[in-house]
Amino acid sequence: MTPPIGLISLATASPPHELEQDEVRATVLEVFRERFPLVERLAGVFDNAGVRRRQAVKPIGWYLQPRSWPERSEAYLEGAVTLYCEAAERALDEAGICGADVDLVVTVSTTGVSTPSLEARAMSRLGLRPDAARVPVFGVGCAGGATGLALSARLAAVHPGATVLFVTVELCTLALRNEEVSAADIVATALFGDGAAACVLRAGEGFAQVEGQGEHTWPGTLDIMGWRADAAGLGVVLSQSIPPFVRRNVRAGLDGVLARQGLGHGDVDRFICHPGGAKVIEALETALDLGQGALDVEREVLADHGNMSAPTVLFILDRLRRGRLPRRSVLTALGPGFTLSTVTLLAA
């Protein structure tokens, strides 16, 4: 029988540079008005994104200059390793353990390329053992918080007694560019922030236990979300069809995931959703019959941090557990593929 896997600790980390939405909006209009006249028509996205502020690894002036792929990569490695260690150290401290107690590390990051991977670069600072197993995961985007947590729980289950450290860090702001501006770039500028989150898992008790996990990938949806690679680095691909797609399809996909766990929609006390943006939150509330305003903490995190991609849903879980988690919650996130990733949690 598979032992229950406990979520022992959860921590988050944010970079130091605070970007207020009003400041970003004014700067974008000033910088791009002449070269990209459509920016005036798109300016409303800054008011409707649901973001008040977000944090970034660089000050706003850094993003106003053309940046090459090597420059963005250097910024990614510097910022990502710093945030990785901050989140991981906080999670280890909360769990009452040190890096040497970790048997396996799962790392999720899709906003930069690092070989050696981030956990290898962080090993000495965190005090990880040389024999600690490393599992870096790339390409899951906004679904990565749920995907990485699910994978970590599976690995903890098949290695009884093992302590698993899961860390996700995303620096979405490094995809912002001013060389060749598109409508998707403007939307990304209004939404994206940077952040990291970390968890410790092992068999036994925790503030929550992982009851199940599941995914659903819709065929023919590769163009909805992802990256494009060009001379400047990784540029965002965002389809305008995401909110209507969510309204039409997410309920059936999620119901299928729950059914495979022997659960129905009514068995879930709280859905914990990666917010994406304000319109995606509204679409999720409609699709899941939650009622307008039900995803209140999702809106709070989006407003305070922007869309940080994979870590965002863990920021939401962290806020919820500092109040009181309901008995059963399902953590969900949508990412490139186009994929729904879920983790079912039972509160302690």
Image: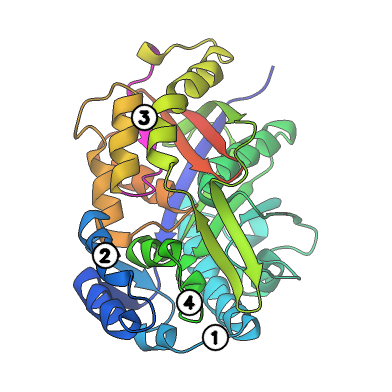
Dot 1 or dot 3, earlier in sequence: 1
| Tag 1 and tag 3, C-beta contact below 8 Å | no
- The residue that disc 4 covers is 177
SS assignment at label 3: strand
**Residue type, mark 1 in image:** Arg
Q: Which residues are magenta?
A: 267-277
Quadrant hosting residue 39: bottom left
- The residue that disc 2 covers is 41
Crowding around mark 4 (Cα neighbors within 10 Å: few <14, some 14 to 19, many 20+) is: many
SS assignment at label 2: helix
> At 53% across and 34% down in the image, what residue appears?
340
Label drawn at residue 67: 1
Q: Nearer the viewer, mark 2 or mark 3?
A: 2
User: Looking at the image, can residue 127 be seen?
Assistant: no
**Residue type, mark 4 in image:** Arg
User: Looking at the image, can residue 134 be seen?
Assistant: yes
| Tag 2 and tag 3, C-beta contact below 8 Å | no
| Tag 4 and tag 1, C-beta contact below 8 Å | yes
> At 59% across and 38% down in the image, what residue appears?
221
Residue 337 sits above or below residue 345 on the image: below
Q: Is residue 116 left or right of residue 171?
A: right
Quadrant hosting residue 328: top left
